[in-house]
Image (tube, rainbow, N blue to C red):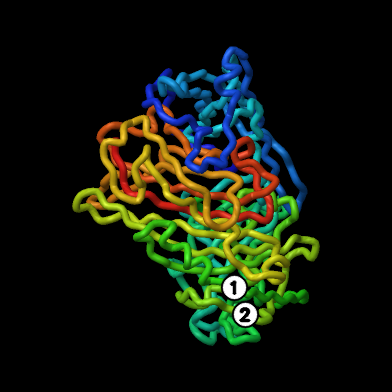
Amino acid sequence: MYKSLISLGLLVGVTGVGCAGIEESEAVDSSVSTDATSQVTQGLITHVTGTSAVTFVATSGNETKPYDQSATSVVAYMRDSTTGAFTAYPGTGSADGTISVPNVPSGRIYLKLGSRYLVSTSRAFDLGSTEWGRDGTFASLPTPVTVSATGLSPWQPEDFLDMYSLNPGAFGYIDGSAMGLPLAGATSLSGLSFDYANMLNPVLLDSSRGDVFSLAQMRLQTSANGVPYRAMHKVLDTSMTQVEGQPVTVSGHFTQPVATGTFAVDWRRSAFEAMRAQVNPGAVSTYNEIWMSARPAALSSALASISGPPLLVKLHPDTQRTDIVTGSMTYNNPLPATWQKVALAAAGFTKSYALGTATPYTMRVDIRVDQEASAFTAAPVQPLVGPVQAPQVNTRGAFQDLTGVGTDASLRWSKPLVGTATNYVVNIYRLGVSNGFTTATRVAVVHTDLQSVYLPPDVLRAGQTYFAEIQSWYQPGSDLVTSPYKRTLPRGRASVLTGMFSP
């Protein structure tokens, strides 16, 4: 089992009515080409299809399985640019991973898969993905793990522990909620205890399937130019088999990998910070970091080439946004020599949203770059694509709070000032209140290569309040509309957060 990439949510309405206005092809930037087929060949009846092959990349061997689409709500919506009306063409998903929508007129569709919409004139979609690790079961119940081990290098307060298992693709950080964390100067773990279910990817381990439990000491070091960083230092490898909800105890010895490496970056943090006000005029800068690791080359097409441990280098030196030239950073490398080294740079930003007197909800977004690690060392690290410009809800500036936008609202924007966006992804969040706190629930995700989208029926509801995140993506060689879960390197992403709006 693996976590579904397709969010199931919105129920299907047969038709919906929207206000007439510019068609999707008539985007804000006049250089965008028009879509003549939407009006010229409406009489042609077509068949929308899709496949969902999931490839699991594991050290024990790769495996491809279909993702079961039988529970997915599948509908193709078409919008009449004259009347603004959406017409729904119901489809089906099957256990073999295929989706099918028959009898759909030619032209642009909004293909609905659960709460995800793919805006395209295509009729064939690749809904497959690539996952790190074998097909496994996730721990959802508390599953305690206790570790005793010798061989640590004298522990420093700034060190931390990474947990990973290469075969199932399990990983996570041992954070402050763990009991028995080492004290300064300690060279052993004595009853370190943590809840495995709290890991970022808690695939239950099974030693009979080749799974190995690994715990890495990420040690604080200083680069050649005096920049603090943390690097892979020593690793504990031991056998472990888990049963969900049951505790397990392991022991072993930390050893230092024989293989070593170096990494250096010219990090233009100021270039990321210069885009803060484009994310939102009220956005707050929160963090900036670089991760470097290694993955099987096949995972370059996965959703995230860097998604967590095992890390080789983590650079998170301070909260400033000044530029840094690190000089050489050394690390020990327990990972296979044939794996592709990859790196991620990200700058984080937040914006708060509040309903009434409820405690605000803090939305976190980032501007990020994923590349091969060699690209980080060869040229300055800076954004590959910037945030979109001049976002609007209908024809009104979207950074302000808006009311009366209608349940058939559109969102539109201009191209980023930096880089070239190959696709855009719009996330729609509905705000609510629970126990005095403002909450946010994502209700729709819209993929498009245009600069505007109309929100299909039932995304916005009267009496509710929403905000949108508009992502610009630079991902040459991969289309997020027809292949929403496929990735390529290099890639970049930047977000814009709107104000609140309500129908």
Q: Residues within 10 Å of mark 2 (few under 14, many from 20)?
A: many
Q: Residues within 10 Å of mark 1 (few under 14, many from 20)?
A: many
Q: Give coordinates of residue 169: x percent, y percent.
A: 64, 54
Say which mark, if any, is on residue 267: 1
Q: How many marks?
A: 2
Q: Are marks 2 and 1 in contact (CB under 8 Å)?
A: yes
Q: Does residue 72 appear in the picture of this structure?
A: no
In the picture of the structure, the residue carrying the numbered disc 2 is 326
Label 1: which secondary element: strand
Measure the C-alpha gap from mark 2 to mark 1: 8 Å
Looking at the rendered structure, the kind of residue marked 1 is Trp
Label 2: which secondary element: loop
Q: Give coordinates of residue 375: x percent, y percent.
A: 70, 65
Q: Is residue 261 left or right of residue 17?
A: right
Question: Going 36% across and 39% down the picture, which residue do you hit?
Answer: 395
Q: Give coordinates of residue 433: x percent, y percent.
A: 26, 46
| Front residue of this view, candidates 126 and 332 | 126
Say which mark, if any, is on residue 97: none
Question: Going 39% across and 60% down the picture, which residue do you hit?
Answer: 350
Looking at the rendered structure, the kind of residue marked 2 is Thr
Q: Give coordinates of residue 454: x percent, y percent.
A: 44, 33
Image height of 442 relative to 72, above or below? below
| Front residue of this view, candidates 114 and 156 | 114
Question: Going 37% across and 30% down the picture, which residue do you hit?
Answer: 408
Question: Going 62% across and 23% down the picture, which residue do you hit?
Answer: 48
Image height of 24 relative to 412, above or below? above
Q: Nearer the viewer, mark 2 or mark 1?
A: 1
